[in-house]
Amino acid sequence: MHELSIMSYMLDTVEQQAQQSGARKVLAINLVIGERASFMDDALLFYFDMLTPGRLSAGAKLNIRRTPMRFHCAICDNDYAPAIGSFRCPDCDTVGQVTSDGSELLIESMEIET
Amino acid sequence: MTIEQTIDTLHSIKTIQIVKNLLVDNDLVAAANRQRFVASGILAVNVIAAPGAGKTSVIIRMIEALREQARVGVIEGDIAGSIDTAKVLAAGARDAVQINTGGNCHLEAGMIQRALDDLDLRQLDVVFVENVGNLVCPTHWALGEQIKLCILSAAEGHDKPIKYPEIFAASDAIVLNKIDLIELVDFERDFFYESVRALNPSAPIFEISCRTRAGISDFGFWILECLKQARGQTAELNRTASS
């Protein structure tokens, strides 16, 4: 459900940027969405298709790059992806500290036709 | 074919780098809301939890605990209905506004901006914003609060930080409610603390029970400390404005 809001915000930014750049059409939109954000690709695409008809972004390809959540282990001095059901370091079994990886919610770039 | 080729030579394709947060427009409104809270000397708390974790009960206990020291206002966010607004007013809230999101699973900064026009900020010290019951969606939408508060009830289980990491990582404080049930529901405290600390090393964790009132005064004391800090920001703002 929150995918509807996020798509709506994203399209406002993209459409505004496209108009300023004199675009006839938006061909592709490139997003980066971290794993921590709990946004589902299918739902994002569903609302994207629902919100775009009649706009510059209609028919554009929505590319979503996913970034995984990572933790840092101070003992091993290593970053790691957590195993299912635990945030502990897979090598030494101590509890690491989450890094900022995986919290991204970005519009990275877009391709337009002028 | 020939026509398409002609079009291709007439129009060019280019890539534009943007690198913008998806919620930048919401964040701008949230910053304006925050400015209003700070200017009025108010501490705003965004209360996020799953349905049934005890958001309204915690707010009611805070209204009672702070009665002598702080005037509390509440912005209630619900998909429908105004049952919680009636409850907090009956408990002694100075003012309350109901937002019905009409199906939206979280509050957004624009909704708070409109609600603030209906709250008499001069009569308030602390504003609790009760978000829509949900541990996922409300996390990303800043409302202008100084404190993001996550409430988990013991009955929901010790594994919630593993399943919903972002809210635990983003919170300024975490309340573990219904602590009186902890023995009955096999809640593993060590696992819970370990997982929360992996996500958030500094947020205080308050174990409370709205039913038995355990831990309520400690949590109320912390809210008052946050109010003092918020008033410090207001004094700073006034000094800057007058200099």
Image (spheres, coloured by chain):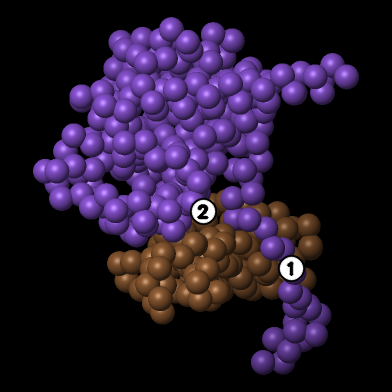
Side of B127 where B189 appears, left or right: left
Q: Quadrant of the N terminus of chain B?
A: bottom right
What hue does chain B carry in this figure?
Answer: purple
Q: Residue at x 39, y 52 (%)?
A: B196
Q: Amino acid at mark 2?
A: Ile
Q: Which chain is brown?
A: A
Measured as percent of width and height from the top left, residue B44 is found at: 53, 27
Residue identifier under label 1: B17
Q: Quadrant of the C terminus of chain B?
A: top right
Side of A65 where B61 appears, left or right: left
- Tell me the crowding category of disc 2: few under 14, some 14 to 19, or many 20 or more residues within 10 angstroms, Cα based: many
Measured as percent of width and height from the top left, residue B174 is found at: 40, 40
Write down the chain letter for disc 1: B
Name the residue nearer the viewer: B182 or B117.
B182
Q: Residue at x 29, y 32 (%)?
A: B208
Query: Is residue B160 something that shows in the picture?
Result: no
Side of B230 where A94 appears, left or right: left
Q: Residue at x 23, y 35 (%)?
A: B178
Measured as percent of width and height from the top left, residue B43 is found at: 55, 24
- Tell me the crowding category of disc 1: few under 14, some 14 to 19, or many 20 or more residues within 10 angstroms, Cα based: few
Label 2 sits on a secondary structure element that is helix
Name the residue nearer the viewer: A42 or B184.
B184
Query: Image quadrant of residue B240?
Result: top right
Q: Which mark is residue B192?
A: none
Rendered position, B199 above or below A81: above
Residue identifier under label 2: A6
Query: Image quadrant of residue A31?
Result: bottom right
| Number of marks in picture | 2
Write down the chain letter for disc 2: A
Q: Residue furthest left?
A: B184
Name the residue nearer the viewer: A64 or B61.
B61
